[in-house]
């Protein structure tokens, strides 16, 4: 049973995380953090281990407490922007199909990254860009707070109960659940705790996402 409260005839909305959900950026993230760590003479593996479970500002506190956090963040942004320009990116199988199959105005991106980088990555991979991207600059609290997903719903004019969240990471899953939305997990061998449905790949989830958006009762309740 899900948290969904969709009624017949009501518009449904799909909110996607980006990195790890639509775009495979794990290798890029590891390279960026390695380059960042080397700039400061730090152990790249240890820095990446911390960065995986914390936001950048929290990572700096743990691994580079003696350095200026503003300088640390500026360096990270510089490296990330360069990676968007020169790095190799790939979309997960099924990403283009599901995004092109959804009605305009019925989906959005909710990311802990920044909009200009998301647009750059989507341009590199050929994915269609929605009218709404809720990024790190658009909210005061990031995932796992419900704020990012609630902000997306509000800007779409959607009730949270009419929204389906597609995520790959525990913090994003918790964000969607706390927002009162239906949450499906993708691109993981094991289900993230709390998800209403789990798919090992985005490709496997595509027909179910499109069915949800179209109002198929089979995908309204798991």
Image (cartoon, rainbow, N blue to C red):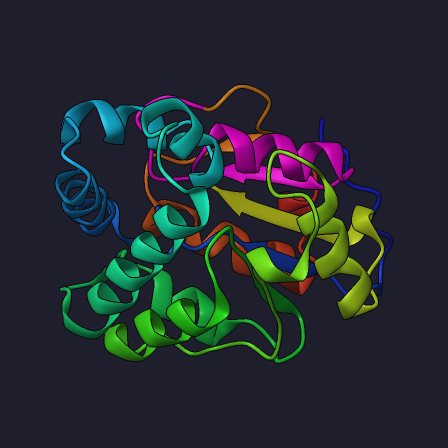
Near-viewer residue (198 or 154) = 154
Residue 9 visible in the current orientation: yes
Q: Residue at x 14, y 71 (%)?
A: 86
Residue 181 position within the rendered picture, expressed as x and y whole percent measured from the top left: 73, 41
Quarter residue 103 falls in: bottom right
Q: On the rendered structure, is 14 left or right of 90?
A: right
Q: Residue at x 42, y 78 (%)?
A: 128
Q: On the rendered structure, is 116 left or right of 123?
A: right
Q: Is residue 221 magenta?
A: no
Q: On the rendered structure, is 211 left or right of 50?
A: right
Q: Is residue 61 above or below residue 21?
A: above
Q: How many marks?
A: 0
Q: Is residue 120 above or below residue 17?
A: below
Q: Which residues are magenta?
A: 168-191
Quarter residue 22 falls in: bottom left
Q: Is residue 186 magenta?
A: yes
Quarter residue 83 falls in: bottom left
Near-viewer residue (62 or 154) = 62
Q: Residue at x 17, y 30 (%)?
A: 42
Residue 176 position within the rendered picture, expressed as x and y whole percent measured from the top left: 66, 39
Near-viewer residue (48 or 91) = 48
Residue 15 position within the rendered picture, expressed as x and y whole percent measured from the top left: 60, 56
Near-viewer residue (101 or 91) = 91
Q: Residue at x 66, y 70 (%)?
A: 106
Q: Is residue 164 above or below residue 128?
A: above
Quadrant of image for the C terminus: top right
Residue 23 visible in the current orientation: no
Quadrant of image for the N terminus: top right
């Amino acid at each position: 049973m899900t948290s969904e409260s969709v009624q017949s005839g009501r518009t449904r909305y799909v909110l996607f995380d980006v990195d790890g959900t639509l775009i495979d950026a794990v290798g890029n993230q590891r390279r960026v953090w390695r380059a960042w760590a080397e700039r400061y003479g730090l152990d790249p593996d240890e820095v990446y281990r911390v960065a995986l479970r914390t936001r950048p500002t929290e990572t700096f506190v743990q691994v580079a407490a003696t350095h200026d956090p503003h300088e640390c963040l500026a360096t990270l942004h510089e490296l990330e922007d360069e990676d968007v320009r020169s790095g190799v990116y790939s979309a997960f199988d099924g990403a283009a199909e599901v995004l092109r199959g959804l009605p305009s105005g019925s989906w959005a991106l909710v990311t802990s990254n920044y909009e200009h980088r998301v647009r750059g990555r989507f341009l590199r991979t050929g994915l269609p860009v929605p009218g709404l991207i809720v990024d790190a600059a658009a909210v005061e609290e990031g995932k796992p707070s419900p704020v990012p997903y609630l902000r997306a719903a509000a800007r779409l004019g959607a009730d949270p109960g009419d929204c389906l969240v597609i995520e790959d990471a525990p913090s994003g899953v918790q964000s969607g659940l706390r927002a009162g939305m239906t949450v499906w997990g993708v691109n993981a061998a094991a289900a993230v705790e709390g998800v209403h449905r789990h798919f090992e790949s985005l490709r496997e989830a595509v027909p179910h996402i499109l069915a949800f958006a179209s109002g198929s009762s089979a995908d309204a309740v798991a």
